[in-house]
Amino acid sequence: MTPTHFAFSSMFMLGLAGLTFNRNHLLSSLLCLEGMMLSLFIALSLWTLQLDSTSFSPSPMLLLAFSACEASAGLALLVATARTHGSDRLHTLNLLQC
């Protein structure tokens, strides 16, 4: 495993560990998801450059577009949660309460 691959796989695993163990606020969970998507984008971009293939060229941009859509949906949920519940703490959310 090259140092570049190790750096991006460890970046992804750190984002996953942060998402798993640090679930206090919705904003911290969204930041961990964005870190994971950023590591996937950079790894996919480097993989496309190493292959020198034009058929995989749109893949990183497609992943970046989906990441932007995911970020906007997450921020909309964050604003809606903060308005209805008063905070973004995940422990105050109750699925049975409407």
Image: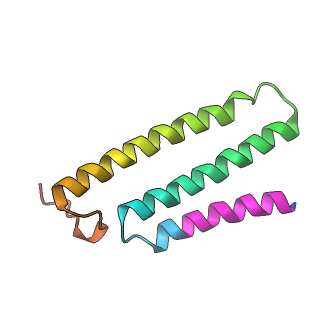
* Image side of residue 32 versus residue 46, left or right: left
* Image side of residue 70 versus residue 36, left or right: left
Farthest top residue in view: 55
At 30% from the left and 66% from the top, the residue drawn is 90
Q: Please determine whether, in this image, residue 24 is positioned above or below residue 63.
A: below
- Is residue 9 located in the magenta-colored stretch of the structure? yes
At 76% from the left and 62% from the top, the residue drawn is 7
Farthest left residue in view: 98
Q: Please determine whether, in this image, residue 96 is positioned above or below residue 48.
A: below
For the image, the number of numbered tags is 0
At 45% from the left and 43% from the top, the residue drawn is 70
At 69% from the left and 28% from the top, the residue drawn is 58
- Is residue 8 located in the magenta-colored stretch of the structure? yes
In depth, the one of 30 and 97 nearer the eye is: 30
| Residue 31 locus on image (x, y percent) | 49, 58
| Residue 82 locus on image (x, y percent) | 24, 57
Q: Quadrant of the N terminus?
A: bottom right
User: Which of the colour schemes (rainbow, by chain, secondary structure, one colour) is used?
Assistant: rainbow
Does the image show residue 1?
no
Q: Please determine whether, in this image, residue 98 is positioned above or below residue 89.
A: above
The magenta region covers 3-17
- Main SS, magenta region, reads helix
Does the image show residue 6?
yes
| Residue 33 locus on image (x, y percent) | 51, 55
| Residue 28 locus on image (x, y percent) | 44, 64
Farthest bottom residue in view: 21
Q: Quadrant of the C terminus?
A: bottom left
